[in-house]
Amino acid sequence: MLKVLLAGLGVRGRHWAEVIKRDARADLLAYADPDARACQRACAEFGDRPAFAHVEDALNSLDDVGALVLANPPMERESIVRAAAGRGLHMLIEKPLALDLDEARRCVEIAERAGTSLMIGLNFRYLEVTTALKGLLAEERVGKPAFARFTYERWRDGGRGDLNDYPLTMRQPMLWEQSIHHFDLMRYVYGQEPVRVSCRAWNPDWSMYAHESNVAALIEFDGGLVVNYHGTWQGNWAVPGFEWRTDCSEGIITHREQFGALYYARRDDEKLTPVSLPAHERWITETRALFERFVDHVLDGTALECSGRDHLMSLAMLEACVRSSEQKSAVDVGGISS
């Protein structure tokens, strides 16, 4: 059994509590959150456990923790990573690892020096639609990918009680909180690394966010692929829009909903061909798959997936977007990631 300390009991933390509770090889040992009400709610919903205000308090009181799942906001995590690594804990940390590339690098290095594993909670990699999309590309169902368009349009009401509110005041909330998923998916699905980014980030007049909630970027990859990306958290229609279309040498693949709706077509097909996908429990199915890989790694020694070291390249893409928008010029990702 892997004995787990869960830190951060907000919206995402409650998903993690449910997932850990369901896993036959994991034991939800204790909670940590500075909000006493959040701790009380977790005890009522997921089982009465010791609860602490801070991770460090929990580590000073518990002797048999084997892993830390960290779902708190991505600010000032370095001290937590240092404390957990000092105890030899393996860590699964929600994306992004940090809101600063240098801090993220330090966190990765702390874990590596301590010999502990650091996995990033990139749950979208484990969606069935992601697996199917990656499979279509690998088998070249419609040839080799040449260019793509990724569109994500959302009216994210930061005042809703079931959403985290800290993005309302953070810098570049769309990039660091949402686009990080999309950029990671591009790297994972295409098996290519970004080399150059041209980006503009801005805020519409009606935005409730203090900083830029719109992102438009042209991303060039080392395999020759070019992706045209547009993401917004302040699209002015409450109905969300999502399409990830990849144009290949013999046709297209299109992913039309965030959690499903995958199709392909050859150039002369009159209709799209749907790809069958299994049933999905939103936020739980893919998170369970991710957590199972983490448990397999810790208990059985399987290869670590979504490593902190790999995550640094996705963060470098974000940093390149920020710099490109500020400088109003294209930015080479290699000069940032090295």
Image (tube, helix red, strand yellow):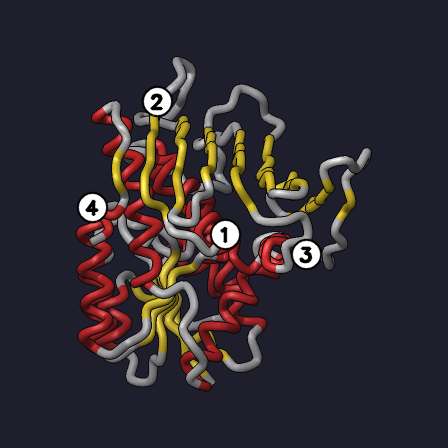
Q: Residues within 10 Å of mark 2 (few under 14, many from 20)?
A: some
Disc 1 to disc 3, how far (Cα)? 23 Å
Q: Residue at x 49, y 31 (%)?
A: 156
Q: Nearer the viewer, residue 312 or 259?
A: 312
Image location of residue 286, percent across then percent down: 57, 60
Query: Which residue carries the number 1 mark?
Result: 190
Quickly name the residue at label 4: 335
Q: Nearer the viewer, mark 1 or mark 3?
A: 1
Please name the residue that numbered disc 2 is placed on.
202
Which quarter of the picture shows residue 321?
Answer: top left
* Dot placed on the residue nearer the N-terminal end, 4 or 1: 1
- The image shows residue 75 at horizontal and vertical percentages of 25, 49
Seen from the viewer's position, the closer of residues 319 and 49 is 319
Q: Which residue is mark 3?
A: 280
Position of the C terminus by quadrant: bottom left
Q: Amino acid at mark 3?
A: His
Tell me which label, 1 or 3, sits earlier in the chain.
1
Residue 151: x and y in percent read 53, 32
Give whichever of discs 2 and 1 has the lower sequence position. Answer: 1
Q: Residue at x 47, y 37 (%)?
A: 227
**Which type of secondary structure does the marked residue at label 4 adopt?**
helix
281 sits left or right of 291 in the view: right
- Tell me the kind of residue under disc 1: Tyr
Q: Secondary structure at mark 2?
A: strand
